[in-house]
Image: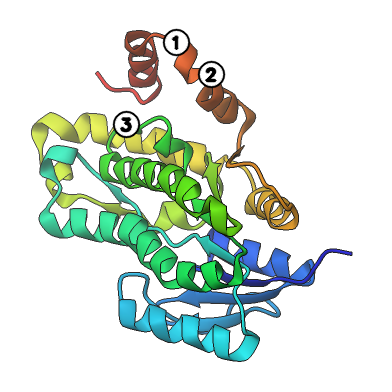
Amino acid sequence: MERQKVILITGASSGFGLVTATELVKHGHVVYGTSRRGGEGGEGVRMLAMDVTDKGTIKAAVELVMAEQGRIDVLINNAGVGIGGAIELATDKEIEWQMGTNFMGMANMCSAVLPLMRRQRSGCIINISSIAGVMAVPFQGFYSASKYAIEGYSEALAMEVYPYGIRVCLVEPGDFNTNFTANRNVSEATMACEDYKGNFERSLKVIEEEERGGSKPIELARAICRIVRRKNPPFRTKVGPWFQVMLARVRWMFPNKLLAKALRWFYKIR
Protein backbone atom coordinates (compact mmCIF):
# COMPACT_ATOMS: atom_id res chain seq x y z
CA MET A 1 0.00 0.00 0.00
CA GLU A 2 1.21 3.49 -0.85
CA ARG A 3 2.59 5.38 2.17
CA GLN A 4 0.46 8.37 3.13
CA LYS A 5 2.23 11.69 2.64
CA VAL A 6 1.44 15.26 3.60
CA ILE A 7 1.38 17.31 0.41
CA LEU A 8 1.16 21.07 -0.16
CA ILE A 9 0.22 22.17 -3.69
CA THR A 10 -0.11 25.75 -4.93
CA GLY A 11 -2.65 26.93 -7.48
CA ALA A 12 -5.08 24.17 -6.54
CA SER A 13 -8.40 25.90 -7.24
CA SER A 14 -8.48 25.09 -10.96
CA GLY A 15 -6.66 23.45 -13.87
CA PHE A 16 -3.65 21.22 -13.20
CA GLY A 17 -3.67 21.99 -9.50
CA LEU A 18 -7.31 21.06 -8.90
CA VAL A 19 -7.11 17.78 -10.81
CA THR A 20 -3.75 16.84 -9.30
CA ALA A 21 -4.81 17.61 -5.73
CA THR A 22 -7.98 15.54 -6.14
CA GLU A 23 -6.05 12.61 -7.62
CA LEU A 24 -3.51 12.69 -4.78
CA VAL A 25 -6.34 12.47 -2.24
CA LYS A 26 -7.64 9.40 -4.07
CA HIS A 27 -4.21 7.83 -3.54
CA GLY A 28 -4.63 8.27 0.21
CA HIS A 29 -2.50 11.35 0.78
CA VAL A 30 -3.24 14.33 3.04
CA VAL A 31 -3.45 17.24 0.62
CA TYR A 32 -3.46 20.97 1.31
CA GLY A 33 -4.17 23.19 -1.67
CA THR A 34 -3.69 26.92 -1.96
CA SER A 35 -5.12 29.76 -4.00
CA ARG A 36 -5.26 33.50 -3.55
CA ARG A 37 -8.84 33.37 -2.29
CA GLY A 38 -8.86 29.92 -0.70
CA GLY A 39 -12.42 28.65 -1.06
CA GLU A 40 -13.41 25.19 -2.22
CA GLY A 41 -11.04 22.77 -3.93
CA GLY A 42 -11.30 19.16 -4.96
CA GLU A 43 -13.03 16.59 -2.79
CA GLY A 44 -10.98 15.89 0.32
CA VAL A 45 -8.54 18.76 -0.34
CA ARG A 46 -8.01 21.28 2.47
CA MET A 47 -7.89 24.68 0.78
CA LEU A 48 -5.89 27.57 2.24
CA ALA A 49 -5.89 31.24 1.22
CA MET A 50 -2.33 32.05 0.20
CA ASP A 51 -0.53 34.20 -2.36
CA VAL A 52 2.81 32.86 -3.58
CA THR A 53 4.07 36.45 -3.96
CA ASP A 54 3.23 37.30 -0.32
CA LYS A 55 5.70 35.79 2.15
CA GLY A 56 3.41 36.56 5.08
CA THR A 57 0.59 34.40 3.73
CA ILE A 58 3.08 31.68 2.81
CA LYS A 59 4.45 31.60 6.37
CA ALA A 60 0.94 31.38 7.82
CA ALA A 61 -0.06 28.53 5.49
CA VAL A 62 3.09 26.50 6.14
CA GLU A 63 2.75 27.00 9.91
CA LEU A 64 -0.87 25.80 9.77
CA VAL A 65 0.06 22.61 7.92
CA MET A 66 2.90 21.95 10.37
CA ALA A 67 0.63 22.58 13.37
CA GLU A 68 -1.93 20.10 12.06
CA GLN A 69 0.35 17.45 10.56
CA GLY A 70 3.83 17.97 12.01
CA ARG A 71 5.52 17.56 8.64
CA ILE A 72 5.40 18.38 4.93
CA ASP A 73 6.56 15.51 2.72
CA VAL A 74 5.91 16.99 -0.72
CA LEU A 75 5.69 20.54 -2.08
CA ILE A 76 4.21 20.94 -5.56
CA ASN A 77 4.84 24.38 -7.04
CA ASN A 78 2.04 24.62 -9.59
CA ALA A 79 0.77 28.21 -9.36
CA GLY A 80 1.35 30.11 -12.59
CA VAL A 81 0.03 32.81 -14.91
CA GLY A 82 0.48 33.70 -18.57
CA ILE A 83 0.72 36.86 -20.65
CA GLY A 84 0.61 36.91 -24.45
CA GLY A 85 2.42 39.71 -26.24
CA ALA A 86 5.62 41.02 -27.76
CA ILE A 87 8.63 41.03 -25.43
CA GLU A 88 9.57 44.56 -26.52
CA LEU A 89 6.21 45.99 -25.49
CA ALA A 90 5.79 44.28 -22.13
CA THR A 91 5.29 46.77 -19.32
CA ASP A 92 7.21 46.66 -16.04
CA LYS A 93 3.98 45.65 -14.30
CA GLU A 94 3.35 42.77 -16.72
CA ILE A 95 6.93 41.50 -16.40
CA GLU A 96 6.85 41.73 -12.61
CA TRP A 97 3.51 39.89 -12.47
CA GLN A 98 4.68 37.11 -14.79
CA MET A 99 8.12 36.55 -13.28
CA GLY A 100 6.97 37.29 -9.74
CA THR A 101 4.24 34.66 -9.80
CA ASN A 102 5.84 31.92 -11.88
CA PHE A 103 9.46 32.14 -10.73
CA MET A 104 9.70 34.13 -7.50
CA GLY A 105 6.50 32.54 -6.23
CA MET A 106 8.10 29.12 -6.65
CA ALA A 107 11.31 30.31 -4.98
CA ASN A 108 9.33 31.80 -2.07
CA MET A 109 7.59 28.47 -1.46
CA CYS A 110 10.85 26.52 -1.57
CA SER A 111 12.50 28.91 0.90
CA ALA A 112 9.58 28.46 3.31
CA VAL A 113 9.48 24.65 3.17
CA LEU A 114 13.15 23.69 2.82
CA PRO A 115 14.14 24.36 6.48
CA LEU A 116 11.41 21.91 7.55
CA MET A 117 12.50 19.28 5.04
CA ARG A 118 16.14 19.64 6.10
CA ARG A 119 15.15 19.00 9.71
CA GLN A 120 13.16 15.96 8.58
CA ARG A 121 16.09 14.84 6.38
CA SER A 122 13.47 13.98 3.78
CA GLY A 123 11.11 15.57 1.31
CA CYS A 124 10.30 16.07 -2.34
CA ILE A 125 9.84 19.34 -4.21
CA ILE A 126 8.06 19.14 -7.57
CA ASN A 127 8.37 22.28 -9.68
CA ILE A 128 5.97 22.61 -12.59
CA SER A 129 7.98 23.96 -15.51
CA SER A 130 6.85 23.60 -19.14
CA ILE A 131 8.04 22.45 -22.52
CA ALA A 132 8.16 26.24 -23.07
CA GLY A 133 11.02 26.10 -20.58
CA VAL A 134 12.88 23.85 -23.02
CA MET A 135 11.80 25.50 -26.29
CA ALA A 136 10.74 29.14 -26.08
CA VAL A 137 7.37 30.11 -27.57
CA PRO A 138 7.00 33.36 -29.57
CA PHE A 139 4.83 36.02 -27.97
CA GLN A 140 5.04 34.05 -24.73
CA GLY A 141 8.53 35.36 -24.06
CA PHE A 142 8.32 36.17 -20.36
CA TYR A 143 6.28 33.03 -19.69
CA SER A 144 9.07 31.03 -21.36
CA ALA A 145 11.69 33.03 -19.45
CA SER A 146 9.98 32.24 -16.14
CA LYS A 147 10.01 28.53 -16.97
CA TYR A 148 13.65 28.58 -18.10
CA ALA A 149 14.42 30.23 -14.76
CA ILE A 150 12.62 27.42 -12.93
CA GLU A 151 14.73 24.90 -14.85
CA GLY A 152 18.05 26.47 -13.83
CA TYR A 153 16.94 27.05 -10.24
CA SER A 154 15.80 23.43 -9.91
CA GLU A 155 19.02 22.01 -11.36
CA ALA A 156 21.09 23.91 -8.79
CA LEU A 157 18.71 23.23 -5.90
CA ALA A 158 18.66 19.49 -6.58
CA MET A 159 22.42 19.32 -6.06
CA GLU A 160 22.42 21.54 -2.96
CA VAL A 161 19.77 19.61 -1.01
CA TYR A 162 20.61 16.08 -2.12
CA PRO A 163 22.76 15.36 1.00
CA TYR A 164 19.72 16.00 3.22
CA GLY A 165 17.44 13.40 1.65
CA ILE A 166 15.46 15.98 -0.33
CA ARG A 167 14.68 15.29 -3.96
CA VAL A 168 13.84 18.01 -6.50
CA CYS A 169 11.87 17.17 -9.64
CA LEU A 170 10.83 19.11 -12.73
CA VAL A 171 7.58 18.36 -14.55
CA GLU A 172 7.49 19.80 -18.08
CA PRO A 173 3.94 19.79 -19.49
CA GLY A 174 3.21 20.35 -23.14
CA ASP A 175 -0.19 21.65 -24.24
CA PHE A 176 -3.14 20.69 -22.06
CA ASN A 177 -6.81 21.55 -22.29
CA THR A 178 -7.30 23.65 -19.14
CA ASN A 179 -8.68 27.06 -18.20
CA PHE A 180 -5.16 28.50 -18.63
CA THR A 181 -6.08 29.43 -22.23
CA ALA A 182 -9.12 31.46 -21.20
CA ASN A 183 -7.24 33.10 -18.33
CA ARG A 184 -4.24 34.26 -20.38
CA ASN A 185 -3.75 38.03 -20.36
CA VAL A 186 -3.24 39.67 -23.75
CA SER A 187 -0.95 42.66 -24.23
CA GLU A 188 -2.97 45.67 -25.36
CA ALA A 189 0.19 47.37 -26.61
CA THR A 190 0.96 44.41 -28.90
CA MET A 191 -2.57 44.42 -30.33
CA ALA A 192 -2.17 48.14 -31.06
CA CYS A 193 1.24 47.79 -32.75
CA GLU A 194 1.08 47.61 -36.56
CA ASP A 195 4.36 45.68 -36.82
CA TYR A 196 3.51 42.96 -34.28
CA LYS A 197 -0.29 42.69 -34.44
CA GLY A 198 -0.60 40.32 -37.43
CA ASN A 199 2.06 37.85 -36.32
CA PHE A 200 0.79 37.97 -32.75
CA GLU A 201 -2.79 37.18 -33.73
CA ARG A 202 -1.74 34.30 -35.98
CA SER A 203 0.65 32.86 -33.39
CA LEU A 204 -1.87 33.20 -30.57
CA LYS A 205 -4.49 31.39 -32.64
CA VAL A 206 -2.09 28.46 -33.15
CA ILE A 207 -1.17 28.43 -29.45
CA GLU A 208 -4.80 28.41 -28.32
CA GLU A 209 -5.81 25.72 -30.84
CA GLU A 210 -2.97 23.51 -29.62
CA GLU A 211 -3.98 24.07 -25.99
CA ARG A 212 -7.66 23.34 -26.60
CA GLY A 213 -6.71 20.19 -28.49
CA GLY A 214 -4.10 19.21 -25.93
CA SER A 215 -3.90 16.41 -23.41
CA LYS A 216 -6.29 15.97 -20.49
CA PRO A 217 -5.11 17.28 -17.10
CA ILE A 218 -5.59 13.84 -15.52
CA GLU A 219 -2.53 12.65 -17.47
CA LEU A 220 -0.38 15.21 -15.70
CA ALA A 221 -1.99 14.40 -12.35
CA ARG A 222 -1.18 10.71 -12.75
CA ALA A 223 2.41 11.52 -13.72
CA ILE A 224 2.78 13.57 -10.53
CA CYS A 225 1.26 10.74 -8.47
CA ARG A 226 3.91 8.40 -9.85
CA ILE A 227 6.65 10.85 -8.84
CA VAL A 228 5.21 11.15 -5.32
CA ARG A 229 5.12 7.37 -4.99
CA ARG A 230 8.74 6.78 -5.97
CA LYS A 231 11.61 6.87 -3.48
CA ASN A 232 14.04 8.14 -6.14
CA PRO A 233 11.92 9.87 -8.78
CA PRO A 234 13.39 11.09 -12.08
CA PHE A 235 14.62 14.67 -12.13
CA ARG A 236 12.70 15.52 -15.35
CA THR A 237 9.32 14.28 -16.47
CA LYS A 238 7.86 15.46 -19.77
CA VAL A 239 4.15 14.89 -20.29
CA GLY A 240 1.64 15.94 -22.94
CA PRO A 241 0.98 15.40 -26.65
CA TRP A 242 3.45 12.80 -27.92
CA PHE A 243 4.86 14.99 -30.71
CA GLN A 244 5.65 17.87 -28.35
CA VAL A 245 7.28 15.55 -25.84
CA MET A 246 9.34 13.86 -28.56
CA LEU A 247 10.46 17.19 -30.06
CA ALA A 248 11.48 18.51 -26.64
CA ARG A 249 13.59 15.39 -26.08
CA VAL A 250 15.42 15.50 -29.43
CA ARG A 251 15.60 19.25 -30.09
CA TRP A 252 19.31 19.26 -29.20
CA MET A 253 19.96 17.10 -32.27
CA PHE A 254 18.81 19.85 -34.67
CA PRO A 255 20.83 22.90 -35.72
CA ASN A 256 19.46 26.05 -34.11
CA LYS A 257 18.82 27.69 -37.47
CA LEU A 258 16.73 24.76 -38.69
CA LEU A 259 14.73 24.53 -35.46
CA ALA A 260 14.05 28.29 -35.45
CA LYS A 261 12.85 28.15 -39.06
CA ALA A 262 10.51 25.25 -38.27
CA LEU A 263 9.08 27.05 -35.25
CA ARG A 264 8.53 30.27 -37.20
CA TRP A 265 6.64 28.24 -39.79
CA PHE A 266 4.58 26.46 -37.16
CA TYR A 267 3.61 29.68 -35.37
CA LYS A 268 2.93 31.48 -38.69
CA ILE A 269 5.48 34.25 -38.20
CA ARG A 270 6.17 36.05 -41.44
Q: How packed is label 1: few (under 14 Cα within 10 Å), some, or many (20 or more)?
A: few
Question: For numbered disc 2, what is the local secondary structure?
Answer: helix
* Nearest the eye: 189 or 76: 76
Vertical order, 215 against 22 (above or below): above
- Work out whether residue 255 can be spotted: yes
In the displayed orientation, state which residue is furthest to the front: 163
Q: Based on the displayed image, in which of its 4 quarters is residue 81 positioned?
A: bottom left
Q: Amino acid at mark 1?
A: Phe
- Disc 3 versus disc 2: nearer the observer: 2
Q: How packed is label 3: few (under 14 Cα within 10 Å), some, or many (20 or more)?
A: some
Residue at horizontal 34 percent and vertical 38 percent from the top: 204
Question: For numbered disc 1, what is the local secondary structure?
Answer: loop
Residue at horizontal 36 percent and vertical 66 percent from the top: 108
In 3D space, how far apart are the residues under numbered discs 3 and 2 (Cα atoms)? 26 Å
The image shows residue 230 at horizontal and vertical percentages of 74, 52
Residue at horizontal 55 percent and vertical 29 percent from the top: 244
Q: Amino acid at mark 3?
A: Arg
Q: Which residue is mark 3?
A: 202
Q: Do the numbered discs 1 and 3 sit on residues whose CB atoms are within 8 Å? A: no
Q: Do the numbered discs 1 and 2 sit on residues whose CB atoms are within 8 Å? A: yes
Q: How packed is label 2: few (under 14 Cα within 10 Å), some, or many (20 or more)?
A: few
The image shows residue 207 at horizontal and vertical percentages of 41, 37
Q: Amino acid at mark 2?
A: Val
- Work out whether residue 12 can be spotted: no
Q: Which residue is mark 1?
A: 254
Q: Which residue is mark 2?
A: 250
Q: How many marks?
A: 3
* Nearest the eye: 112 or 216: 112
Q: Disc 3 or 2, which lies upstream in sequence?
A: 3
The image shows residue 83 at horizontal and vertical percentages of 29, 51
In 3D space, how far apart are the residues under numbered discs 1 and 2 (Cα atoms)? 8 Å
